[in-house]
């Protein structure tokens, strides 16, 4: 740091140089991200509440009320009345919060026992962090040929050391939804905590379900589901950081309570202390502004583009595409190395990610991606093939 400060124009022109190195969503070239351009309505609310700290709710009583309303609205979306939970930084923190609660519940009943967590290989890598942080023993439930939890293999893995089962509604690599209905029954029967990671699917599936006969069951309608991760900063269009954790049972959230003697409220049930109230205000404004029908339109558009992209890719000789469930497409090209192809596409200015299992290219059709971007992408891909 220089002893004397710089003039403001110099500071910002220096910042500009850094900013130019970043990709921006509006270019339409970011095809591998689960985030998108934050909506301007949310950004307006975010700026309005930029100094608000939900870690000290007595100072920010209005924002605290907003958090309660947001949790209630998200709970309703997930078919839960009188929900409890928090707005957190993202899916990772939401998953950590749920697994901490599950661990405390488990430890009360089984002191001194190393807890086991049953999860699929398709779980997000945040669970690797959780397993290490909380010293859990991972028990991997096999996937079926559709890359979903093989429910026929689940029950036999439950033991008296099972702390929780984790299922995914919108996997990171394929956007697939596990058979939560069946998994929920298994968890309920065996009285095991079930956490559903709907970080991505949470703001997609409820809107897809609206006019569908074959509803995708994934939320609190399934009686065995104890908690759900749902991220507004993914398909909820909220600015980063905006994650969500919702618990069915208030007592479960209470397990996390820590006394905060010198603050304005005497306990906290979040992992972090100081936390932004701006994200909460942004989510509140977006839920109010768009309503169910507004989000449904956003999801319908994303799904329409997903169908369009799927058909385009499927029509190219040598391209093998998996049928998408949500707005995420996985594909590879026969006789072409996935990683080399990714690098070549990157050299052409496309950000596209590679999934590990299955090893394939992965496109997330977020709202910033439009038909013209897909047309350009397909034309570049054809050149490479
Ligand atoms: N659970 C699931 C199912 C996820 O897909 C993710 C993130 C998480 C939890 C963790 O969420 P946070 O990253 O909010 O803590 N999935 C994306 C991924 O790993 C995150 C992401 C988003 C990565 C935007 C890159 C990016 O540009 O692909």
Image (cartoon, rainbow, N blue to C red):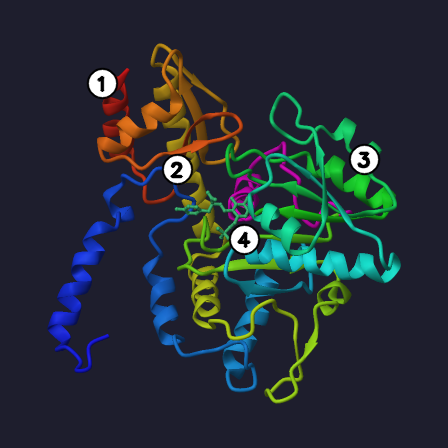
Q: Is residue 32 visible?
A: yes
Seen in the image, is 243 located left or right of residue 24? right
Q: Does the residue labelled 4 lie within 8 Å of ligand 1?
A: yes
Which of the labelled discs sits on residue 383, or is there none?
Answer: 1
Task: State which region is magenta.
Answer: 199-224
Mark 3 or mark 1: which comes first in sequence? 3
Secondary element type, mark 2: loop
Give neighbour class at mark 3: few <14, some 14-19, many 20+ (Cα, 10 Å).
Answer: few
Residues under labels 3 and 2: Cα distance? 36 Å
Q: What element carries label 1?
A: helix
The C terminus, quarter of image: top left
> Disc number at residue 157?
3
Residue behind mark 4: 91
Mark seen at residue 178? none
The secondary structure type at the circle numbered 3 is helix
Q: Circle 2 is placed at which residue position?
A: 365
57 vs 289, left or right, is right
Label 1 – label 4 distance at C-alpha: 37 Å
Q: Is residue 240 left or right of residue 121?
A: left
- Residue 28 falls left or right of residue 184: left
Q: What's the distance in space between the residues labelled 4 and 3, CA to CA? A: 26 Å
């Amino acid at each position: 740091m220089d002893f004397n400060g710089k003039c403001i124009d110099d500071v910002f022109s220096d910042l500009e140089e850094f900013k130019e190195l970043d990709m921006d969503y509006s270019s339409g070239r970011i095809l591998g991200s689960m985030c998108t351009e934050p909506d301007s309505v949310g950004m307006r609310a975010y700026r309005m509440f930029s100094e608000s700290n939900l870690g000290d709710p007595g100072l920010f009583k209005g924002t605290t009320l907003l958090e309660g309303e947001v949790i209630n609205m998200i709970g309703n979306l997930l078919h839960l009345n009188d929900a409890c939970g928090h707005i957190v930084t993202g899916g990772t923190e939401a998953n950590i919060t749920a697994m901490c609660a599950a661990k405390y519940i488990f430890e009360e009943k089984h002191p001194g026992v190393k807890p086991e967590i049953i999860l699929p290989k398709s779980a997000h890598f945040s669970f690797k962090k959780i397993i290490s942080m909380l010293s859990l023993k991972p028990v991997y439930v096999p996937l079926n040929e559709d890359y979903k939890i093989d429910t026929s293999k689940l029950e036999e893995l439950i033991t008296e050391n099972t702390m929780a089962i984790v299922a995914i509604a919108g996997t990171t690599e394929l956007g697939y939804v596990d058979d939560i209905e069946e998994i929920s029954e298994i968890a309920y029967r065996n009285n095991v905590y079930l956490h559903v990671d709907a970080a991505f699917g949470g703001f997609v599936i409820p809107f897809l379900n609206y006019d569908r006969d074959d509803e995708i069951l994934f939320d609190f309608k399934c009686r065995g589901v104890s908690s759900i991760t749902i991220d507004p900063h993914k398909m909820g269009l909220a600015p980063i950081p905006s994650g969500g954790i919702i618990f069915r049972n208030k007592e479960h959230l209470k397990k996390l309570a820590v006394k905060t003697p010198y603050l304005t409220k005497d306990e906290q049930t979040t992992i972090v202390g100081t936390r932004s109230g701006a994200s909460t205000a942004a989510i509140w404004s977006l839920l109010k502004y768009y309503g169910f029908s507004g989000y449904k339109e956003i999801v319908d558009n994303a799904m329409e583009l997903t169908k369009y992209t799927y058909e385009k890719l499927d029509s190219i000789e040598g391209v093998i595409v998996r049928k998408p469930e949500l707005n995420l497409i996985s594909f590879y090209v026969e006789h072409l190395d996935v990683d080399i192809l990714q690098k070549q596409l990157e050299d052409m200015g496309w950000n596209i990610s590679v999934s590990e299992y299955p090893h394939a290219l992965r496109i997330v059709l977020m709202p910033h991606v439009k038909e013209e971007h897909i047309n350009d992408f397909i034309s570049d891909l054809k050149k490479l093939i």
